[in-house]
Image: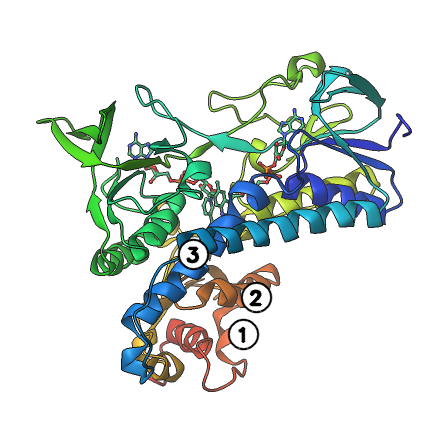
Amino acid sequence: MADTYDLVIIGGGPGGYNCAIRAAQLGLKAALIEKRDTLGGTCLNVGCIPSKALLHASELFATAKTDFAGMGIKVGRVELDLDQMMAQKTDAVNGLTQGVAYLMKKNKIDHIQGTGSISAPGQVTVTAQDGTQQTLSTPNIVIATGSEPTTLPGIEIDEERIVTNSGALSLGAVPKKLVLIGAGVIGLEMGCVWSRLGAEVTVVEYLDRILPGADAEIARDAQRIFRKQGLNFRLATKVTGVDKLKTKLKLHLEPAAGGDADSLDADVVIVAVGRRPFTQGLGLDVIGGTTDKRGVIQTVNGPFGVAEGVWAIGDCIAGPMLAHKAEDDGAAVAELIAGKAGHVDWNLVPSVVYTQPEIAWVGQTEDQLKANGVTYKKGKFPFQANSRARTNHQTDGFVKILADAETDRILGAHLMGVGVGEMIGELCVAMEFGAASEDIARTSHAHPTLSEAIRQAAMGVEGWTMQM
Ligand code: FAD
Ligand code: NAI
């Protein structure tokens, strides 16, 4: 195996492997170092993919139990086979991680298994699991080491009873009482999975609202819907400790603003209070690289440049911690290394929460626009008034489009409803092209489709929604 490369990428997640593929397409020789046994990073191994596999299967289970009868479908007793549900999740993960390994071969990228660290400017040393080392030379080091779960002081993770996202995706049985700490994306997605499978779920959140990154109106409505689905919420509450008793866990709670202490019993606790960049043992100091207090790698030369010939992408730098953002960063850095104009607009990276209904957004929220003093107009359309949603008996949620009051340029789009994770792409394309709300309002949308709600909301910006 050659030990000199045009670029050496440390970390084989969506940031790293997509950077390698784009570099190979541009004629560069790339090495991809990954310490895990499989490629795909957090996303494929313990994140996006296994969580979506469980979300999909648990949703079918819940639908069969609660909605089939009303649709005129009679089935026998619907029973859970958790082992099989986990097996299909593992199948999806294995198929996709092997797919990434195939893409490396196809693109003639050297996949080197081991832990990479920067040993000198232009040099990366890889230590394999058996301790053997090899050093690679390159004018371009790309750091794509991703992130790890944040923990809380006084709470000891054992990945069996007190777990992070990894344990949460592999519980051996449905817990009777499950507590999630954090009402962010993982808290809600995992809360929904285990609640659908029969757990009594409580979500404890420090803030007085769920989903801090989402539009406040959607977050309020979503909480009401999740409450109806069986999730309990303890907002504005902090967990000060968890006692591991023989038969149960005892969480100690306090109001976030101070006040009387309280407690809550659980069989399993999932800690989902955010993620922090992973840069341990990377040798950042060797090239004069620094991180902020949260561990985010600081870039000094554009959004990705850490030092001369050193780049960083994905979860370990600023911007949303999302797989498609890491992928875009990776492609942009490969293009910059190849002398092209790589660029990513992090403001137009969509977010999707894969609950039922889904929540999706892109651009700015109303709160952000107000804080920035931007005057905007808004159009809103409920799925209750959309014919396809009515036909499907899935009428929760709405579409909200925010546009500049003067220019009509779309500044933000916030959706909640079945399938909105697929629908948000239309708004991303529109916003990338600097579209006005009128552009969407005057574009034909097939009938009857859920996406007509987007058009009706866009019409609402100028006050001519027709179907409500
Ligand atoms: P990672 O995917 O974390 O990959 C980094 C890789 O680097 C890892 O494999 C790690 O082993 C390796 N590594 C680290 N240090 C070294 C080293 N020194 N040497 C060698 N290898 C090293 N995002 C979405 O967009 N959609 C979702 O639905 C979604 N769901 C999620 C669900 C969960 C439960 C979690 C935890 C995350 C989810 N995410 C989702 C976030 C997404 O997984 C991350 O944003 C994405 O994986 C970041 O990609 P990355 O390449 O920057 O880092
Ligand atoms: P998050 O940032 O989405 O949510 C963390 C929540 O925990 C916040 O609501 C925060 O206020 C709360 N919190 C923080 N400290 C707390 C404390 N001490 N007590 C109680 N609550 C506390 O982080 P999460 O859910 O851990 O997910 C991490 C990241 O992974 C996400 O930000 C996202 O980038 C990514 N992800 C994306 C998914 C998707 O795209 N569908 C799915 C899952 C994760």
Query: Distance from label 2 to label 3 (Cα)?
Result: 29 Å
Tell which of 288 and 148 is nearer to you. 148
**SS at mark 3?**
helix
Tell which of 234 and 250 is nearer to you. 250
**SS at mark 2?**
helix
Q: Position of residue 374 (x, y in %)?
A: 40, 52
Q: Amino acid at mark 3?
A: Leu
**Up/down of 279 relative to 399, above or below:** above
Tell which of 249 and 424 is nearer to you. 249
Task: Classify mark 1: residues with Cα within 10 Å, few (<14), some (14-19) or many (20+).
Answer: some
**Up/down of 45 relative to 143, above or below:** below
Q: Quarter of the image holding residue 24?
A: top right
Task: Classify mark 2: residues with Cα within 10 Å, few (<14), some (14-19) or many (20+).
Answer: some
Tell me the mark number nearer the camera, choosing from 1 and 2. Answer: 2
Tell which of 130 and 464 is nearer to you. 130
Question: Where does ligand 2 appear, by image quarter?
Answer: top left
Residue shown at 64%/32% (left/top)? 36
Query: Distance from label 1 to label 2 (Cα)?
Result: 8 Å
Q: Position of residue 46 (x, y in %)?
A: 52, 41
Disc assigned to residue 439: 1
Q: Quarter of the image holding residue 240?
A: top left
The answer to whether marks 1 and 2 mark residues whose Cβ atoms lie closer than 8 Å is: yes
Tell me the mark number nearer the camera, choosing from 1 and 3. Answer: 3
Disc assigned to residue 430: 2
Camera sees residue 350? no
Q: Earlier in the sequence, mark 1 or mark 2?
A: 2
**Up/down of 226 relative to 142, above or below:** below
Disc assigned to residue 55: 3
